[in-house]
Amino acid sequence: MTKAAADALVQEGDALFRAERYADAADVFERAAQMYPPHPLAWRGLGHALLCLGELHEAARAFDRSIGLRGDSATALWGGAVAHAEIGNKVVAQNYLRRALALQPTWIEMARAYPQFAPYLRV
């Protein structure tokens, strides 16, 4: 399959995600990732949808894959930090959070509001 077909699925997944149809979005993002495995947006979208569904380990794996393909995505890094913090992978969560905040310094307030990030934000 082609990247163009996967791009179309990612757009469909994004629309489903915005409509808060997380299970449907996860299915579409997963199809896009299977169709074109080096698609970082498919993996990132899958991670966010799975995170919203409470499937934390699967979300962490999807974010890891997205970050491995494109390490400068602040939203993938943020999602990965959340997922890994929730499952107790402190080293990975802290690494992803630091990288996300380096890309988006204004997100520090958002990070401060997330209780699981408190240990990582102490000086």
Image (spheres, rainbow, N blue to C red):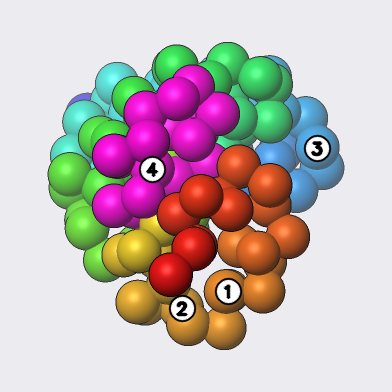
The residue located at (68%, 52%) in the rendering is: 114
Observer-nearest of 56 and 69: 56
What kind of element bears circle 4?
A: helix
The amino acid type of the residue labelled 2 equals Gln
Residue 91 included in the magenta stretch of the image? yes
**Residue 81, visible in the rendered structure:** yes
Quadrant for the C terminus, please.
bottom left
The amino acid type of the residue labelled 4 equals Ala
The image's mark for residue 93 is 4
The residue located at (78%, 30%) in the rendering is: 21
- Dot 4 or dot 2: first in sequence order is 4
> Within 10 Å of the Cα at label 1, are there few (<14), some (14-19), or many (20+) other Cα atoms?
some
The span shown in magenta is 81-96
Secondary structure mainly formed by the magenta segment: helix
The residue located at (44%, 17%) in the rendering is: 58
What kind of element bears circle 2?
A: loop
> Within 10 Å of the Cα at label 2, are there few (<14), some (14-19), or many (20+) other Cα atoms?
some
Would you say 26 lies left or right of 21 here? left
**Residue 4, visible in the rendered structure:** no
Question: Which residue is situated farthest in the bottom direction here?
Answer: 106
Residue where numbered disc 2 is placed: 104
Residue where numbered disc 3 is placed: 20
- Dot 3 or dot 2: first in sequence order is 3
Q: Is residue 49 above or below residue 97?
A: above
Q: Is residue 16 above or below residue 35?
A: below
Residue 102 percent location from the top left of the image: 35, 77
- Dot 3 or dot 4: first in sequence order is 3
The amino acid type of the residue labelled 1 equals Trp
Would you say 15 lies left or right of 99 here? right
The residue located at (60%, 62%) in the rendering is: 111
